Image (spheres, rainbow, N blue to C red):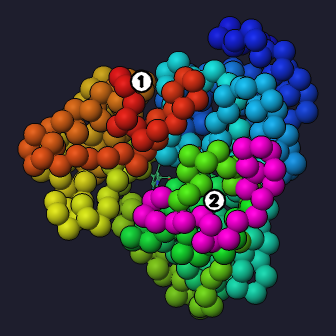
Amino acid sequence: MTSPFSLDRYQKQLEQLAKVVCSVFDAPLAEHSSWKIGGPADLLVEPVTVDQVATVVSFARRYEIPLLVIGQGTNLLFDDAGLRGIVLKLGQKLSRIDIKGNRITAEAGVWVPGLARKAMLAGLSGLEHTIGIPGTLGGLVLMNGGSQRKGVGENVRRVWIVDQQGQQVELSRDECVFSYRQSALQGSGAVVVKTELECARQEPQLIRQLMLEDLRERRHKFPRKQPNCGSVFLSTSEMHASVGPPGRVIEEAGLKGTRIGNAEVSHQHANFIVNLNGATSKDVLNLIAHIRLTVKQRIGFNLCCEVRYVSPAGEIMPAHLATV
Ligand SMILES: Cc1cc2nc3c(=O)[nH]c(=O)nc-3n(C[C@H](O)[C@H](O)[C@H](O)COP(=O)(O)OP(=O)(O)OC[C@H]3O[C@@H](n4cnc5c(N)ncnc54)[C@H](O)[C@@H]3O)c2cc1C
């Protein structure tokens, strides 16, 4: 089936690619986002090998077709118009894990809570704080995600990427330049395909206890039934020191329960925006703009988004930088 939206200039090339890598035309992006928002992507490909990832990257570059890499879409707001180009999804099909001594080597599509659980069973500590993060390892490494003010970068030893030219490259931890929810991989066009993590030895029972505490706290604090993308706004240590965490700042501005269209500031946690059913990307972006303006007027602070918006042209940016 061909896409009614696809640019004629690359439709034939997409059909060529679909013959060699598992693909879906007109893939509804809402099904690949935890917010359940987003129109169709011209082509969604799910490689099963690193060589296939390199093939897709080289292909997109050769024909100048926009390419977007995703994992579980738990930090992404897709546009209602979808995406004109290729979505490269690294998920279950690229998710092998190998544990040797205190080192874990895992492919980018590995589901993070599953990885944390495997580490626990092997008596390896360090990933406890990731047990409740519902994304892939590739997304986690790129975002230097984590909780309890930690980031996965602390455990990373090496990262294997496919670079913008389609070359497979090995990077050391230092070359990734991890800082709070940041890494040098962001904006570089690199596709993370594999990561080596170093952990410390610990009793599985102790690790399990820490994980259960984390999960209990999340169940208590975060909305679980309504589609969401986790924390919308960044919570830096400077922000904590000056005005407090974003959830508290937004709550104190009286914004809990504020609704635009079908997007609502969660009653449970003010740094979450939930999709009440059928919310559009415009609803979410307008609500983000409203929260930022209210907080700015109230305490003079500029909230910045952790969540990324993807434009129909495949550009990706912190959601507060998107034009509504
Ligand atoms: C309920 C809930 C709770 C959450 N809690 C936390 C939390 O405690 N801490 C936290 O840090 N985050 C949290 N998040 C946000 C999110 O889960 C993380 O940012 C996660 O690491 C994103 O992984 P993903 O696979 O879903 O990436 P996606 O959302 O698919 O993508 C995120 C970014 O990574 C890029 N990307 C994805 N895979 C790759 C790859 N293989 N190579 C290169 N780039 C890639 C994308 O292009 C995009 O820029 C939460 C989300 C939800 C829904």
The answer to which of 215 and 183 lies nearer the viewer is 183
Name the residue carrying label 1. 280
**Mark nearer the viewer, 2 or 1:** 2
Question: Identity of the amino acid at label 2?
Answer: Leu
Mark 1 Cα within 10 Å, few/some/many (few <14, many 20+)? many
Quick one: which residue is furthest to the left in this view? Answer: 298
Picture residue at 77% right of the left edge, 39% below the top: 57
Give the number of callouts: 2
> Which amino acid, mark 1?
Thr
Secondary structure at badge 1 equals loop
Q: Is residue 258 left or right of residue 147?
A: left
Decide which of 218, 183 is in the foreground and name it: 183
Residue 275 figure quarter: top left
Query: Which residue in the protein does label 2 denote?
Result: 137
Mark 2 CB lies closer than 8 A to ligand 1:
yes
Left or right of 125 on screen, residue 309: left
Residue 169 lies within the magenta run: yes
Label 2 to label 1: alpha-carbon separation: 28 Å
Upstream in the sequence, badge 2 or badge 1? 2
Q: Quadrant of residue 214?
A: bottom left
User: Is the residue 232 above or below the residue 281 in the image?
Assistant: below
Circle 2 crowding by C-alpha within 10 Å: few under 14, some 14–19, many from 20: many
Distance from mark 1 CB to nearest ligand 1 atom below 8 Å = no
**Residue 126 position in % (x across, y down):** 55, 79
Helix, strand or loop at mark 2? helix
Q: Position of residue 136 (x, y in %)?
A: 62, 55
Q: Which residues are magenta?
A: 161-182
17 sits to left or right of 299: right
Q: Residue at x 48, y 81 (%)?
A: 209
Q: Is residue 269 in view from this perspective?
A: yes
